[in-house]
């Protein structure tokens, strides 16, 4: 039986993406994404809970994220959950869970979202070709 590891998130960037390059020249962008759930509580009224997700984007998508995304921008993310461990500077083993994005769609600009993905499929939205985005589509 096959298994599925798929995540879909819509949230807001907690800070500007950090873009770095591997020794082979491949770009990788990292940024935190906040998703907030809200509900009504009989005792206290409206309640909210924010979850923070570590997002990792590779390749040309990463470069586009670094160029066009900024803290506060709303995005749609499709990807998979990955866990990894590393040793910190004191030699302690640390564990981190990340969302490795296969598709990033910029939301919140005028004129709809822009899709940035590895497959070229846009799901009905404009594909991001790496060219300039019109100024009215950029909310900052």
Image: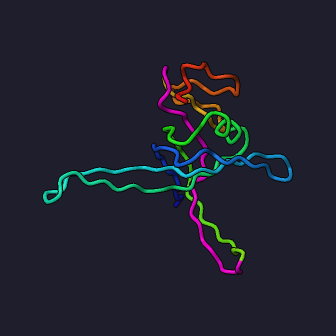
What is the chief secondary structure element of the magenta stretch? strand
Q: Considering depth in this image, is 82 or 109 the residue closer to the camera?
A: 109
Task: Tell me the residue at 56%/26% (across/down).
Answer: 138
- Magenta stretch: includes residue 106: yes
Extent of the magenta region: 90-111
- Residue reaching furthest to the bottom: 91
Q: Is residue 116 above or below residue 35?
A: above
Task: Tell me the residue at 59%/50% (across/down).
Answer: 31
Question: In this figure, which colouring scheme has been used for the structure?
Answer: rainbow
User: Left of 75 or right of it: where is 83?
Assistant: right
User: Left of 82 or right of it: where is 27?
Assistant: right
* Image location (x, y in percent) of residue 107: 49, 32
Report the number of numbered marks.
0
Q: Quadrant of residue 60?
A: top right
- Residue reaching furthest to the front: 140
Task: Tell me the residue at 63%/22% (across/down).
Answer: 133
- Residue reaching furthest to the right: 24
Q: Quadrant of the C terminus?
A: top right
* Image location (x, y in percent) of residue 62: 68, 42
- Magenta stretch: includes residue 35: no
Q: Quadrant of residue 116?
A: top right
Q: Is residue 98 above or below residue 72?
A: below
* Image location (x, y in percent) of residue 20: 75, 49
Q: Considering depth in this image, is 85 or 89 the residue closer to the camera?
A: 89
* Image location (x, y in percent) of residue 14: 52, 49
Q: Considering depth in this image, is 27 or 127 the residue closer to the camera?
A: 27
- Residue reaching furthest to the left: 42
User: Left of 117 or right of it: where is 11?
Assistant: left
Q: Considering depth in this image, is 65 or 135 the residue closer to the camera?
A: 135
């Amino acid at each position: 039986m096959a298994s599925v590891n798929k995540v879909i998130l819509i949230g807001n960037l907690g800070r500007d993406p950090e873009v770095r390059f591997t020794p082979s020249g491949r770009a990788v962008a990292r940024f935190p994404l906040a998703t907030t759930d809200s509900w009504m509580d009989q005792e206290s009224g409206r309640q909210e809970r924010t979850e923070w997700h570590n997002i990792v984007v590779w390749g040309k998508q990463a470069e586009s994220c670094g160029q066009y995304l900024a803290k506060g921008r709303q995005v749609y993310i499709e990807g998979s959950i990955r866990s990894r461990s590393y040793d910190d500077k004191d030699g302690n083993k640390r564990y981190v869970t990340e969302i490795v994005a296969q598709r990033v769609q910029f939301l919140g600009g005028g004129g709809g979202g822009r899709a940035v993905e590895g497959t070229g499929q846009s799901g009905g939205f404009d594909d991001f070709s790496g060219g300039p985005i019109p100024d009215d589509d950029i909310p900052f």
